[in-house]
Image: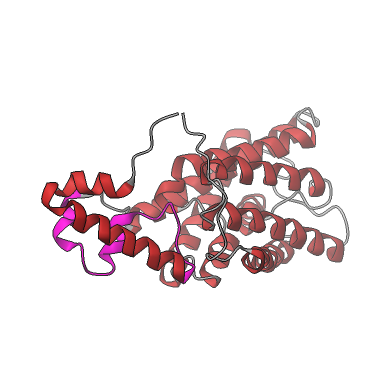
Amino acid sequence: MEDQKDPPSELAQASGPQGGSFVAAIYDRATSVGRSSGHYNKCFPVNQCVAEEGILSELHGSLSPCPSLTRKVLSEFLGTFVLLFAAAGTAIVNEKTAGSLTILGCAAGAGLAVMIVIFSTGHISGAHINPAVTLAFASLRHFPWIEVPLYIIAQVVGSISASYVLKGIFHPDLHGGATLLQGGYVEAFFLEFVISAILMFVITAVATDTRAVGELAGIAVGVTVLLNILISGSTTGGSMNPVRTLGPAIAANNYKGIWIYILAPILGMQLGAGAYTLIRLKDVEPARPVRSFRR
């Protein structure tokens, strides 16, 4: 486990001995303002937080820059590409090999892909890789609405790109990794609605609450995806993500029930995010100690 430095001390070193106390005071102010407003996120860069207050411009050059919007959008494109390549790819391989991977293999492929993307790009763009997640965060004011269209465009393009790459590699003659309905529309809608709500409940907990163990966010979200696919894979394919279905549907030219895979995750994730926000501990209550599992 690496020794964790206190952020004010790091900022003080960056700004020199004379600015140490000034920077520490700014840090305390910024974090206290964030906590009191309910929008504080421990992964949120300190220099951006205080720069928005307009009181750290003279020290901006000595601090690590925040990712630009271009980098965030590119990160979302690449993250969604990786997710679709893995999730749809395992489905294609399973289908071409007469079910050798089984539903467990397909669920593990999607869950591991989500975990990998969160650990590799979460510090850049937040690793939404899902329009329903982006909309849920924006609805609860954890994400700026002005960036929502660009995030969704990047996610859609990443999904379609990965789907056509898979089509070019595997030449699937069956369903091309698309999520397919195996039951009625009502059953499929409520199943996708519930598993999407469960997933967003977990995401909201580990991504927005400073009391949660944020270092394990990737594992928690990835395992939740795996579990949900085990529950729903035989009925709906376990999408929980509009672009997980949209890209393969376009590549395979199969749009059966696509409205379910677009509408149910969006509504379900609004419910999941709202449910965690409702039970979230208030800042006046003592927070449990947070452990670090970084090596």
Whether residue 256 appears in this view of the structure is no
- Between 172 and 95, the residue placed more toward the observer is 95
- Between 265 and 32, the residue placed more toward the observer is 32
Residue 271 sits above or below residue 5 on the image:
below
State which quadrant residue 194 falls in: bottom right
The answer to whether residue 31 is left or right of residue 157 is left
Q: Residue at x 79, y 43 (%)?
A: 230
Does 25 appear in magenta?
Answer: no
Q: Residue at x 41, y 65 (%)?
A: 34
Q: Residue at x 66, y 58 (%)?
A: 201
Percent coordinates x, y for residue 50 in the rendering: 28, 63
Residue 247 sits above or below residue 96 on the image:
below
Residue 58 sits above or below residue 2 on the image:
below
The answer to whether residue 127 is left or right of residue 170 is left
Does 48 appear in magenta?
Answer: yes
> Which of the image's four quarters has the N terminus?
top left
State which quadrant residue 254 falls in: bottom right
- Between 100 and 126, the residue placed more toward the observer is 126
Whether residue 63 appears in this view of the structure is yes
Q: Residue at x 72, y 39 (%)?
A: 107
> Where does the magenta region start and end?
37-62
